[in-house]
Image (spheres, grey):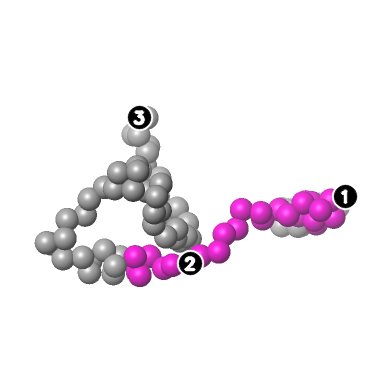
Amino acid sequence: MNQLSEYDIRRNKVSTLRTLGINPFAQQRKKTHNISTLHGHCEAATADEAIHLRSIDDILVSPTKSISIAGRLMLKRVSGKLSF
């Protein structure tokens, strides 16, 4: 009896998906910024500069630059219907 390891089974599944023309890792995104860059940008704002929310009309006319960061979830805390 031939027992395959979990790694072998997963590798075979990925190979099968690729043979069918399906990208098994299609959710990958390109990272545009580091969190340290964003954190430094927020700290650079002085206390005199109030961070305010923009109205929807301003956002539709001139949207801000879109950024993308990547990471992994280290801890998930669920408290009733609320998650952190």
Q: CA distance from mark 3 to mark 2?
A: 34 Å
From the viewer's perspective, is the residue at label 2 or at label 1 nearer? 2
* Viewer-proximal residue among 67 and 63: 63
Residue neighbourhood size for the residue with mark 2, other residues' Cα within 10 Å, grouped as few (<14), some (14–19), many (≥20): few
Horizontal relation, residue 84 to residue 44: left or right:
right
Q: Nearer the viewer, residue 11 or 59?
A: 59
Residue 78, position as x, y percentages in the image: 37, 37
Query: Which three-letter amino acid code belongs to the residue tagged 3?
Result: Gly
- Residue at 35%, 70% (x, y): give it: 37
Residue 56 occupies quadrant: top left
Q: Amino acid at mark 1?
A: Met
> Given the image, on which type of amino acid does mark 2 rest?
Thr
Q: Tell me the CA gap for discs 1 and 3.
A: 47 Å
Q: Secondary structure at mark 3?
A: loop
Give the magenta part as a residue range.
13-38
* In this picture, residue 51 sits left or right of residue 75: left
Q: Is residue 34 magenta?
A: yes
Q: Which residue is mark 2?
A: 32
Q: Find disc 3 in the rendering and name its residue.
A: 80
In this picture, is 2 found above or below 43? Answer: above
Is 36 covered by the magenta stretch?
A: yes
